[in-house]
Amino acid sequence: MTHVSYSELKNWHTCPFYHKLTYVDRVRLFKGNEHTAFGNAVHDTCENMLLNKNLKAEEYFLEQYKKVIQKLSDDDYEFNKKLVLEMKEQGLKLLPQIKPALDEYFGKYKVFATEEKLFEDIDYEDYKFKGFVDLVLMTEDGKCHVIDWKTCSWGWDYKKKNDKMVTYQLTLYKHFFAKKYDLDPANIETHFALLKRTAKKNNVEFFRVTSGEKKTENALNFLEKALYNISNKNYLKNRLSCNRCEFYKTKHCQ
């Protein structure tokens, strides 16, 4: 059965031809960099520190960061050594702030799941929606909280926080999480957790993303539109995205 993830939908929205190259032709030029290495190590540490109270988070982060850096090094990636060292120190500063920030924002809570897998039917042919929710918490008021970690430099501005192609991720996660467990969407709240590596203080920021019936309907309409074009192999090039594309002026996209 064919499945689609939010990352795939976002790539299709950026450029349908880019989607073809990466998801149909399986062409991969980008293997990662310092930023993806940092993000992967921090995500992995967040997941494990919430499942294991005895985990020495800083030591674990250093181990994971070293592993992902080594993997990229094995792929002949040329690192900015100064940036790698800066990110290591930024991670060590950031991690001790996560648990207190969770406690302050959510109050008393229980960890329902980390890396909660979604693989749910979509009302479009034989597609399933695939995703992994970074963190799900249950609070004393009976609410369920779906949370996605986002590593960034200093944070997000108003425009990005309200960009529908950013917030649709949590809207769809909420919809399919509710479907998986047969929950009332009204009892599910969604949040981004910004892990800000260069901020002078308050390196962890939570903000809620509201997803009512209309926004959910719009997100599902977008999903169906994308699947219609993908299944019909409509691979138009979005020339407005060329300057930011890894395939720009390569043999793959002239």
Image: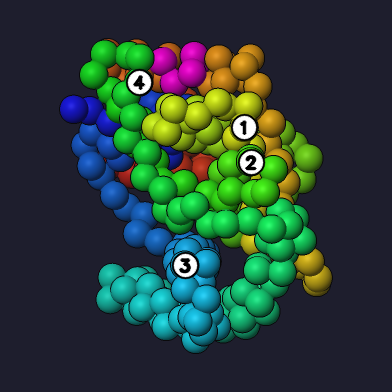
Q: CA distance from mark 4 to mark 2?
A: 27 Å
Left or right placement of residue 100 versus residue 138 in this view = right
Q: Earlier in the sequence, mark 1 or mark 2?
A: 2
Residue at (57% x, 57% y) in the render: 110
Residue at (73% x, 57% y) in the render: 107
Q: CA distance from mark 1 to mark 2?
A: 7 Å
Residue at (51% x, 43% y) in the render: 244
SS under mark 4: loop
**Badge nearest the viewer, 3 or 4:** 3
Tag 4 residue: 122
Q: Are marks 3 and 1 in contact (CB under 8 Å)?
A: no
Q: Are marks 1 and 2 in contact (CB under 8 Å)?
A: yes
Was residue 142 drawn as part of the magenta stretch in this picture?
no
Q: CA distance from mark 3 to mark 1?
A: 24 Å
**Badge nearest the viewer, 3 or 2:** 2
Q: Amino acid at mark 4?
A: Ile
Q: Amino acid at mark 1?
A: Asn
Q: Taking the image as drawn, is residue 103 in sight?
A: yes
Q: Amino acid at mark 2?
A: Gly
- Please state which of residues 243 and 197 is positioned toward the viewer in this rendering: 197
Disc number for residue 142? 2
| Coloring applied to the structure | rainbow
Residue count near mark 2 (Cα–Cα under 10 Å), binned few <14, some 14–19, many ≥20: few
- Please state which of residues 136 and 252 is positioned toward the viewer in this rendering: 136
- Please state which of residues 190 and 186 is positioned toward the viewer in this rendering: 186
Which stretch did the figure color magenta?
A: 220-224
Tag 1 residue: 187
Disc number for residue 76? none
Q: Position of residue 7 (x, y in %)?
A: 43, 39
Instruction: Give the quadrant of the C terminus.
Output: top left
